[in-house]
Amino acid sequence: MANKYANIISFFKKNIIEIPVEDNGDLAADDTIIYRNDEGAEDAGKITYIGPSLDPERIAKDFAVLRKATSHDLQKIEAHDERKSECITQCREQVAVLNLDMNIFDAAYSFDGKRLAFLFTADERVDFRELVKKLASIFKKQIHLHQVGPRDRARMIGGCGKCGKQICCKNWLHKLASITMDVVRLQGLEGKGGGKLAGICGKLLCCLRYEVEEYKKMREGLPLIGSIIQTKDGAANVIGLDVLNRKIKIVSEEGKFAIISDKDVKKIISAPEIRRMEEAAEEPATEESSGGLI
């Protein structure tokens, strides 16, 4: 067994797989390669990383790197890409005819040209069996439809985040972790508003998790927002936190606002009951949440 793995973005399914590679130095990140898929057919993809396994659960079985793409291979891939826009347009037309609530945003041919995949987002599961039949009759290809979540869509399309840099999921973040409102509360950011905490996918920013462990340590001893605390001037309601500077924004019973240090808190009289907001939770993303084949 090879001790190195290549992380490959499949041009066809647009998902990331890990394939064992020989340590021969012939392959590098950004190389386009031809590999054998689990059906024994040739597919194409781009290497994003070579090294120890990043995610053992993602290691693809019965897959193997066949070769670095030749000039002929690259011409074939380019020819498929040139037909993509037309395919998307025709698919959207059929979606409109069938009045399906789905957003087709990408398409791809398999390397051998026998299969054609469409990627879409939708608020709910979609019965696209009739659509698959119509597309098969139009393109005379084996049709695949893959429904993906908004986070996966953002990762595939790419873009710039609020920081001005390329979004993490497109640049280097291969595994999308769960992001919940608990992470937001822990950092005292619940008062920022949804627009400031959401990425281009419309979901909570992935970077909200990067400093969670440090915030857990720094939050020790600080009251939760919504708590009633006792200060030297009497009882007050906690309405905001500056975790990094250990400052607490309060409003007294008389309605006076103030910012105090954590050392000024005599005791916590009561704390709000924290409930996990399941509706705001992000489930770990998958490349395919549903699919169809004919």
Image (spheres, rainbow, N blue to C red):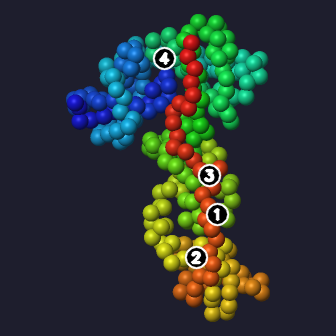
Mark 1 → mark 4, Cα distance in angstroms: 45 Å
Indicate which disc, 1 or 4, sits on the residue closer to the N terminus: 4
Instruction: Give the number of the mark in front: 2 or 3.
Output: 3
Q: CA distance from mark 4 to mark 2?
A: 56 Å
Q: Which mark is residue 110?
A: 4
- Which residue is denoted by mark 3 in the rendering? 278
Task: Give how far apart the Cα atoms at labels 3 and 1 are.
Answer: 15 Å
Quote the CA–CA distance across marks 2 and 3. Answer: 23 Å
Q: How many callouts does the rendering have?
A: 4
Name the residue carrying label 1.
Answer: 190
Three-letter code for the amino acid on which mark 3 is drawn: Glu
Q: CA distance from mark 4 to mark 3?
A: 38 Å
Q: Tag 2, which secondary structure? A: loop
Mark 4 is on which residue type? Ser
| Closer mark to the observer between disc 3 and disc 1 | 3
Judged from the image, the secondary structure of the residue bearing numbered disc 1 is loop
The quadrant of the picture occupied by the N terminus is top left
- State if disc 3 and disc 4 touch (CB < 8 Å): no
